[in-house]
Image (cartoon, grey):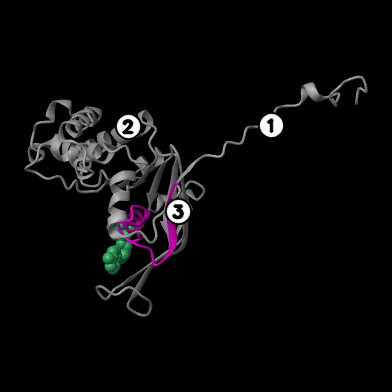
């Protein structure tokens, strides 16, 4: 009922109305649109025909700020290939990858390297540390590569080694550390640049069960403590279930594994 004496138009039931839920547009940190990847099975030649291997066609992905997304899928499904495209380590046959407002397609090799150094933290299944360099030097490497002064880079490296529980091993050569410790160092190296996104390709795949559990738990804690945005490839469904979303790469598409649990169970 409208009260003609009121300045504002009001309705009788106004007080009982529930406020509408606030729709928060979450920031999309990384976006893949219509990605197609076709490898040539004849070395060095990408294309179509009998010698072509199509991994995905028209694949879409959005990763929101603060999300921890697991990607699962059978061996050979193309999980590593997808991560390489997201990190501008490779180029798609068609489609686009965006990181924030930056479109990765069409970057020169130098621009792609700068993008990786600035915006991406990448953890490989094997750590790829330089064994003759100390843990701190290994972690400082991406900062030195972008021209940061050595003392400042080592200071940051020491901070991140502390974050991965290795504050007392900064001066050890990485070759002197255990497999689990080396993977922690590589995690610190991935995060030392404070990247927009952490991409990890089976980061616990080379570790025994207990160590894998500890390293995955560490990734999860760092993700939460530092508000990271992370995409993790894993064969371990228990780890995948601890992520915000589980996507399965199957027949060239990413499907939500939680809405089709029987499919997820077969990974
Ligand atoms: N540079 C390349 N040239 C040709 N084929 C390739 C290339 N890289 C990968 N492939 C092929 O693409 C397919 C997917 O490989 P990819 O490494 O992405 O799979 P994956 O899902 O990561 O497997 P896994 O779980 O075993 O690591 C495989 O058949 C592989 O042989
Ligand atoms: Mg792989």
Whichever of labels 1 and 2 marks the residue nearer the N terminus, that label is 1
Residue 215, position in %: x, y?
A: 26, 36
User: Which mark, residue 222?
Assistant: 2
Question: Would you say the beta carbon of the disc 2 residue lies within 8 angstroms of ligand 2?
Answer: no
Q: Badge 1 is on which residue?
A: 20
Over which residues does the magenta segment extend? 73-100
SS type, badge 1: loop
Report which quarter residue 220 is drawn in. top left
Residue 118, position in %: x, y?
A: 31, 44
User: Which mark, residue 263?
Assistant: 3
Whichever of labels 2 and 3 marks the residue nearer the N terminus, that label is 2
Quadrant where the image shows the N terminus: top right
| Alpha carbon separation for disc pair 2 and 3 | 30 Å
Viewer-closest of 73 and 64: 64
Label 3, residues with CA under 10 Å away: few <14, some 14-19, many ≥20: some
Residue 80 vertical position relative to residue 40 in the rendered view, above or below: above
Question: Would you say the beta carbon of the disc 1 residue lies within 8 angstroms of ligand 1?
Answer: no
| Alpha carbon separation for disc pair 1 and 2 | 34 Å
14 falls in the magenta region? no
């Amino acid at each position: 009922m409208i009260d003609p004496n009121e300045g504002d138009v009001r309705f009788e039931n106004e007080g009982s109305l529930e406020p509408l839920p606030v729709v928060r547009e979450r920031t999309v940190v990384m976006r893949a649109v219509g990605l197609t990847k076709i490898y040539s099975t004849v070395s060095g030649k990408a294309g179509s025909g009998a010698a072509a291997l199509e991994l995905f066609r028209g694949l879409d992905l959005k990763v929101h700020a603060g999300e921890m997304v697991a990607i699962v899928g059978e061996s050979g499904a193309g999980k590593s290939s997808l991560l390489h495209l997201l990190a501008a380590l490779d180029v798609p046959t068609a489609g686009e990858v965006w990181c924030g407002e930056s479109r990765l397609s069409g970057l020169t090799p130098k621009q792609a390297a700068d993008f990786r150094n600035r915006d991406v933290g990448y953890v490989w299944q094997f750590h790829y540390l330089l064994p003759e360099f100390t843990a701190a030097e290994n972690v400082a490497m991406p900062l030195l590569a972008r021209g940061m002064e050595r003392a400042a880079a080592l200071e940051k490296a020491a901070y991140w080694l502390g974050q991965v529980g290795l504050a007392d091993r900064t001066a050890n050569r990485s070759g002197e550390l255990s497999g689990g410790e080396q993977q922690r160092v590589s995690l610190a190296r991935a995060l030392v640049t404070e990247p927009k996104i952490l991409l990890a390709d089976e980061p616990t795949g080379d570790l025994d069960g207990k160590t894998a559990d500890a390293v995955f738990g560490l990734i999860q804690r760092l993700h939460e403590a530092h508000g990271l945005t992370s995409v993790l490839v894993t064969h371990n469904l228990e780890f995948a279930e601890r992520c915000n979303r589980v996507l399965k790469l199957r027949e060239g598409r990413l499907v939500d594994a939680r809405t089709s649990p029987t499919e997820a169970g077969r990974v």
